[in-house]
Amino acid sequence: MPEPTPETPAPRQPHHNTAALAAVHGTLLQARDIHGGIHLHPPAPAEAPPDVSLDAPRPPEPLRGRDDLLAELETAAAEGADRPAVLTGPGGIGKSAVAAALARRAADRGRDVFWVRAGTVAPALLEAAVEAGGSRAEADRLASSPRRAARWAWRHLDAAPRPWLLVLDNADRPDELDPDHRPGEGLGWLRTSPRGGVVVTTRIGDPALWEPALIREVGELAPDDAAAVLADRAGPVGAAGARGLADRLGGIPLALTLAGGAAASHPALFADLGALGEHLSASVLRVDRLSRPLTHPGRRPRRSTLAGVWEASMELLDTAPHAPGLLRLLSVLGADGLEVPLRRLPLSLLRGGDWGSGGEPHNEHLDETALAAALNALAVHGLAALTSVGGERALRIHPLIGETTREGLGDRAAPVARTAALLLDHQRDRDPALERAAHRALVEVCSAALGPDHPDTIGAEVGIARRRLQRGDASGAAAELAGLARRAAGALGADHPVGLRALHHRGDALIALGRLDEADSLFRDLLAARTRALGPDAPDTDEERHQLATVALRRHDWETAAAELETVLAHRASDRAAASPGVLFARVNLCYARLRQGRHAAAEEGLRRVIAESGAQEGTEEPAVTLARLYLAVSRMERGEAGPAEEGFADALRRSEHRLGADHPELAEMRALFDGARAAGGAQG
């Protein structure tokens, strides 16, 4: 993740975390006296984009009962189709499976396939445009301007060298396709093209939303096809009773897949699918309720029967007793069907928590083997898919399973929400799309279980507003955070930590907007409040002090910045946070302030110490350490040492390219410095 800068500071870690400074303190680069006093400031880094995969899923089982629909879609989604095709229906009905089969057919006919998942529409379509011939540098530059980015992306898709098929999967939030217009108007990310066809899968079947699209409802499978799906998934288990079980499950593909998977996983318990049907008899009414939206489309969909299917599977997980609790956590962390990297489930944070409360084993006994068994059990029983995202192993649960799980949390809601919030905070800003969806789910869970004005509910809403700031909407985030702070003050008290956190992030937004006087005043008020509540040297108090230093750096008030940073570092010197990324940034930024004060020797000594103490390999080096290399090169350049400066710039550039990628826009100014040092070295030679 790019290091934060004073121009666009990343919001703080909340609570009393001694590593809280890791994501808050930025950098300021000002290269003076390079060829006549050139002032170079690196651009504010954009939010680290989510890992985007455009590959279509490849289900192992054949698609049953959709031949006529596929034939119609092949015609509707041919190159140059004048309207998109929209597949609607409740979750679990097989819309994505139909789209995946269509994608396989398109690929077999030589068409490129771009599969876009919920939560990644903008970055995925920009990636598709790059694959169609667009410039990655232009895509990165336009990413923060959605309207311009959409027009740019579709220009390149229209001019693609090969015909293509685009699938917008699980488009259940139409405002992601266009926040200002109906998606069907074709003014946002959903359009048509002479070079390809577009297919949308969504639970939202309102024709007024999608017109003039071709809208097709995906219904339940016919009995014979449903029985075949059960047999496919059950594998070697006897197929006897498949027709009866399919009837009882209402022909819903996801329910059929789950039931067949349960049979396949426990052949000793179930001699055939009829035996599994008997086991599911207690939940048959809930299965009937799942079918109700299909026979009565005017009614609000109800999904509790599907919950009955996975609860039946959970009854069989005796060797993985932690699996139900993990599924509940995943229902929040992996909301909207987004992949949850396994690193987001660290054993150190899961052990001892009460997220498995409610008659389940206490999690203090959770170890690596038990965690692996639980995760594997979820995958084996079809409740979660083991997949990968960005080269990492990950878990994905179907959006319908996530929703039904959250709806059924009951008295487990509060502990599950607390643990999910802890897990989200632990690796904040690593997975932006996942975190946005998870915070929305967290608000849903907390509001239902605890009420809208509970600290956990407001805190989750603050997390959503913070993501808005990081997406570049500083003005909107500032207003939203101000409203949340007022609400917290009224419901919880003026000095409640949740309200102070909302104000803190509002200060971040003010800095991003260049409203430095307002930001300075706000952080001074927060510093006073934190000092009263926590003391002058608490980590949260130092967060406010550090942001005052950030404001001072933006004002070129080097003395004030240095004084504030020295105080922060004095407080954290004996702390476990002494080697944290936030403290490293504080040390490096203090060196930069000294450099700007003309104290080159002291600045260089401090920068060399940071570099020497890091001991990291090039691929794992903290961004603050790479920044120290850059500032050291700036100092050498200003002292006329063009050769060492050139080497330093080249080293910092290489390390940054390794971490960010060669096309990252943040590297432009670094390359300019490198070119300047090289030119100066040539002139001296």
Image: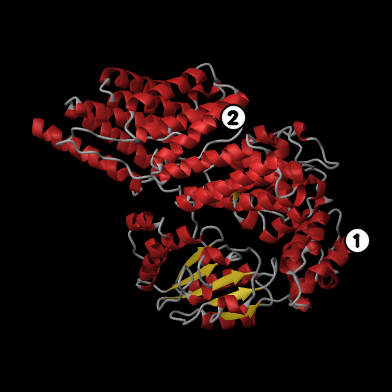
For disc 2, the marked residue is 17
* Residue 53 badge: none
Label 2 secondary element: loop
Pointer 2 or 1: first along the chain: 2
Name the residue at 46% across, 35% down: 521
Towards the viewer: 442 or 641 = 442
Q: Residue furthest top?
A: 574
In the drawing, does residue 206 fall left or right of residue 504?
right
* Residue 282 badge: 1
Name the residue at 86% across, 61% down: 276
Residue 395, position in %: x, y?
Answer: 63, 50
Residue 579, position in %: x, y?
Answer: 49, 24
**Label 1 crowd (10 A; few <14 / some 14-19 / many >=20):** few
Towards the viewer: 579 or 600 = 600
Looking at the rendered structure, the kind of residue marked 2 is: Asn
Looking at the rendered structure, the kind of residue marked 1 is: Ala
Would you say residue 18 is visible in this rendering? no
Residue 501, position in %: x, y?
Answer: 57, 38
Towards the viewer: 670 or 361 = 670
Name the residue at 65% across, 69% down: 203
In the drawing, does residue 200 fall left or right of residue 670?
right
Name the residue at 55% across, 40% down: 503
Would you say residue 196 is visible in this rendering? yes
Label 2 – label 1 distance at C-alpha: 47 Å
Residue 204, position in %: x, y?
Answer: 64, 71
Quadrant of the snapshot with the N terminus: top left
Colour scheme of the picture: secondary structure
